[in-house]
Amino acid sequence: MPLDNVVFWVFAPLSVATAIGMIVVRNAVHAALFLVVNFFTIAVMYLLLDAPFLFAVQIVVYAGAIMVLFLFVIMLLGVDRGDAPGERLLGQRTTAVILAVAIVAELATAIRAGIGFTTRAPGGFDAVNPGGNPSALADVLFRDYFFPFEVTSILLIVAAVAAMVLALRRSKSLSQREIETHAGDDLEAYGLAAPGAPGTVGEPSR
Amino acid sequence: MLTEYLPIVAMAVLAVAFGVASLVVSRMFRPHRPNPVKLSPYECGNDPVRLPRGERFSVKFYVVAMLFIIFDIEIIFLFPWAVRFRQLGLFGLVEMAFFIGLVFVAYIYVWRAGGLDWATSVEAPADADLASDSPRDPMAAADEELAAAMHDAEVAGAR
Amino acid sequence: MDWVGWAILVVRVAIVFFGLLISVMLYIWMERKVIADMQTRVGPLRAGPRGVLITLADGIKLFFKEGITPTAADHPVYAVAPILAMFPGFLAFCVIPFGTSVTLFGREIPFQLADLNIGILWILAMTSLSVYGVVLAGWSSGSNYPLLGAVRSSAQMISYEVGMGLALVAVLMYSGTLRMSELIAAQDTVWNVIPQFPAFVVFLIGAIAETNRPPFDLAEAESELVAGFHTEYSGIKFAMFYLGEYVSTVTVAAVAVTLFLGGWRGWWPFDGAVAWIGPLLWFVLKITAVIYVLILVRATLPRMRYDRLMNFGWKVLIPFGLVWVMITGVVVVLPQEYGNRGRYIAGAVIVGAAALATLVAPLFSHRPASEAEPGGQPEGREVRA
């Protein structure tokens, strides 16, 4: 079908371009924006593969939720408008290159194995999706794979606990130290409270 | 399959074109007389004290965003289940109740740990152990320091 | 598709787009008139008969106003943010059926732009994108008030999106389909608002918070944040935020009508040559009614304090939404599995769960038990406080 090809050749280069843009751009928020567009193009790819449910999930969860978290973290850490910081962790670049090569190899193998080392495209999406994609997915997910599904909730619990532990530890030890050591000079500089302390900026005014 | 998305694409193109066109056309007709005061960040007529460069925010916003992701994923799981739960029957119901229950445990933990409280130290002064948990109000701490310094200076001056 | 098909597509999209623009114009006028009435003022009067063209006049004025880009602004993002704020409302409206269909040139043209098989999810997806206009506008302005407003408001929007999503799930369980046209067909006899009234209330509260309307307009709390995320915007860019806000309001009202109020269905049978007018009129009438309720809420309630807003969203709306989803599940599945006996079991399960919740609820309050809020009564209590 030609429409499929048109859509693919519009969105695939866009996808690659935004991915490169995300890495190349120095400003953290700009990089995040490139990533949003990239997520969106990936969503369109799911649509091309007859997976409309995944298309919506990709937009809702990745473009909608996870990127908002990224933006918050960027603002939280105050690294926006970033002049690129130097290499903070030693040997990060070499590790990154090795890992990148590894993941490319892994993905290539997985894809080759997945399509069975043939050049024929897998078919029959309509056959496995009777009554629409979401309900077919529900049958598989909630009958055949109900145990992994339940385990997912454990993952969510871990995420919640981790977030709280990070947040609480930060507010108890780190910021307390920051307040004690820097409160004076920050006040002189800004006439306001120390940055990094919980409850300084964005706190509800009362 | 894809053709049913065509109107949405057309709408997106139209909306963006409308936005860009009105920006561009408006630029041609509107006055452009900038001056430094006009272009400075708005602070109610005062000179801006500081710009939000490297601004830091309360960690609560991070907690909220994290919780939002957790619940968003839960809702995403609920959607296909809701379409199909009549066919899945009692098994599906118990399964989902279990799932929601487990996520609820996380929710209760965050609630009890104070992650959902936006005004703890002021709202609940009666709750003693909670008040001691929360960090000192940085403004108050700074005020005290400032007051002490001024007092010292005054004493020195009097001498 | 041949060229006629393409032409029809373009014309349909254009009609919906400009129809939305005109409806926004009229609803803004209506809001100003109704609020003026409630405050014993006259409201807009000069532009057009009874001031109906006031929005157009405002738009023209803003179009010719100087646009200011602050020195500290991030230029590309600053320019893109208003457009980003505008389009989710338009895109979400694409899946709303606003009438039956009409036959032109021997083709049946449905009064719905795209009948997606993931209709409700598409609305949720667009809602989740609407946060970007706000957060980017605030960040790119390079100024303090917008940044504070943006972070606050985005936290508010994501919090209430969860409640809204849970309301959508409850409706979905009841109707059993994601497709908007089937959803309306499922409300043939009884509108969803009757069996799903709690979900309707949760949805409306979530929708008001999503669109940053009063009493949840913390994004632009004038008394503390000047104008929130769009403080630094002027001229046509500000007009776009304004437009986006009201397009979202119309879209949200349209979603409420479609999910809960039977969509374009009405009682008055129209037939003959103008068969499509009746449903369309019903749709417009219902949207107007929902928007009137939103205006009433705005005129009645004072703006909420931020900590109360977040507390209400996380501690009341979300647990209640989850409980309501489970109640809907129990009520539907148990009778289906066990017949009439299932009804009693369902009743027993719900009463037992409610009793348990009442016992457990005081544990979640940091306040003394005498002031503790029972966890299960969300509607409007906190809002009125």
Image (cartoon, grey):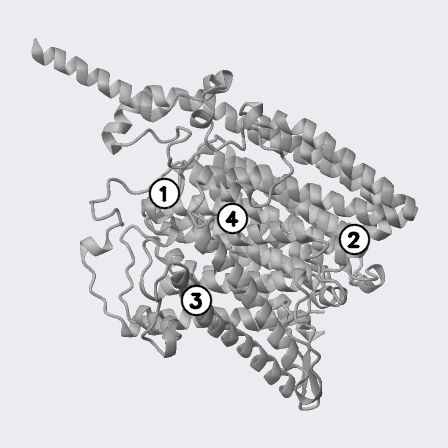
Query: What is the quadrant of residue C330 in the picture?
Result: top right
Q: Can you say whether C36 is above or below C22 in the image?
A: above
Q: Can residue B116 be seen in the rendering of this structure?
A: yes
Q: Can residue A98 be seen in the rendering of this structure?
A: no
> In the rendering, at what x and y percent does residue B104 appear?
68, 34
Q: Which mark is residue C157?
A: 4
- Badge 4 or badge 3: first in the primary sequence: 3
Amino acid carrying mark 3 in the image: Ile
Q: Which mark is residue A137?
A: 2
**Which sits in the foreground, B5 or B96?**
B96
On whether disc 2 and disc 1 are found on a single subunit, the reply is yes
> In the rendering, at what x and y percent does residue B52 appear?
33, 42
* Callout 2: SS: helix
On whether disc 3 and disc 1 are found on a single subunit, the reply is no
- Callout count: 4
Cα–Cα span, label 2 and label 3: 43 Å
Cα–Cα span, label 4 and label 1: 30 Å
- Badge 2 or badge 1: first in the primary sequence: 1
- Please give the residue where the numbered disc 3 appears in the rendered image: C28
Residue at 44%, 55% in the rendered image: C299
**Which sits in the foreground, C66 or C351?**
C351
> In the rendering, at what x and y percent does residue C109 appear?
67, 81
Q: Are marks 2 and 3 in contact (CB under 8 Å)?
A: no
**Which sits in the foreground, C250 or A152?**
C250
- Please give the residue where the numbered disc 1 appears in the rendered image: A83
Observer-side mark, 4 or 2, equals: 4
Q: Are marks 4 and 2 in contact (CB under 8 Å)?
A: no
Observer-side mark, 2 or 1, equals: 2
* Callout 4: SS: helix
**Considering the image in quadrants, where does the N terminus of chain C appear?**
bottom right
- Disc 2 crowd rating (10 Å Cα; few below 14, some 14-19, many 20+) is many
Amino acid carrying mark 2 in the image: Leu
